[in-house]
Amino acid sequence: MEDCIFCRIANREVGSEIVDERPNAIAFKDINPKAPVHILVIPKEHIASLDDLGRDECEVLRDIFSLASDIAVSEGIAQSGYRVVLNIGEEAGQEVDHLHFHLLGGRFMEWPPG
Ligand code: 5GP
Ligand code: ZN
């Protein structure tokens, strides 16, 4: 998707602070962080939303979650705790139509989220 900002970040056509990657996933720092650690983990392939994720995308999900877990360790938030958030659709606040998991940590998290 040439007009998708996250595809362009994944393809390194647009600059971002890339943290790490796997064959099917890439992680980069959120441009407008909501916590001391705020990293977005996305599939490299364009998948618009959870609703568009195929039922057999196990390798994509494995790469996304292993990347998030490893980054939590490398960012020093694995012990204190962290949150992985997926916003789906308008009422949940999804602004970018490319599946992305927010990895948030480094501060106390309220529950439930606002
Ligand atoms: P959503 O609201 O869709 O769940 O989250 C989108 C996130 O992407 C927001 O936290 C926003 O700050 C981040 N974001 C939007 N555009 C860019 C960008 O061009 N670069 C980076 N690094 N983050 C972005
Ligand atoms: Zn995309």
Image (tube, rainbow, N blue to C red):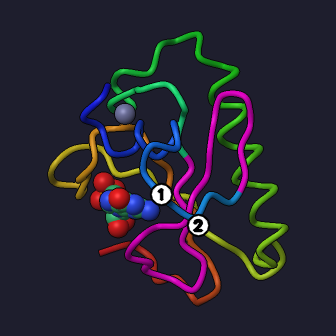
Q: Quadrant of the C terminus?
A: bottom left
Above/below status of 60 relative to 78: above
* Residue 92 image point, x, y percent: 24, 55
Magenta span has 36?
Answer: yes
Q: Are marks 2 and 1 in contact (CB under 8 Å)?
A: no
9 lies above or below 56: below
The residue furthest top is 56
Q: Which mark is residue 83?
A: 2
Q: Which residues are magenta?
A: 20-41
x 75%, y 66%: residue:
72
Q: Position of residue 31 (x, y in %)?
A: 41, 71
Which residue appears at 47% of the width and 13% of the height? 54
Please tell me whether mark 2 or mark 1 is closer to you in this view: 1
Magenta run includes residue 100: no
2 and 90: which is toward the camera = 2
Q: Is residue 87 left or right of residue 75?
A: left
Q: Position of residue 64 (x, y in %)?
A: 65, 40
> Mark 1: which secondary structure?
loop
Amino acid type, callout 1: Gly
Task: Specify the label residue 15 is tagged with.
Answer: 1
Pick the front one: 18 or 61: 18
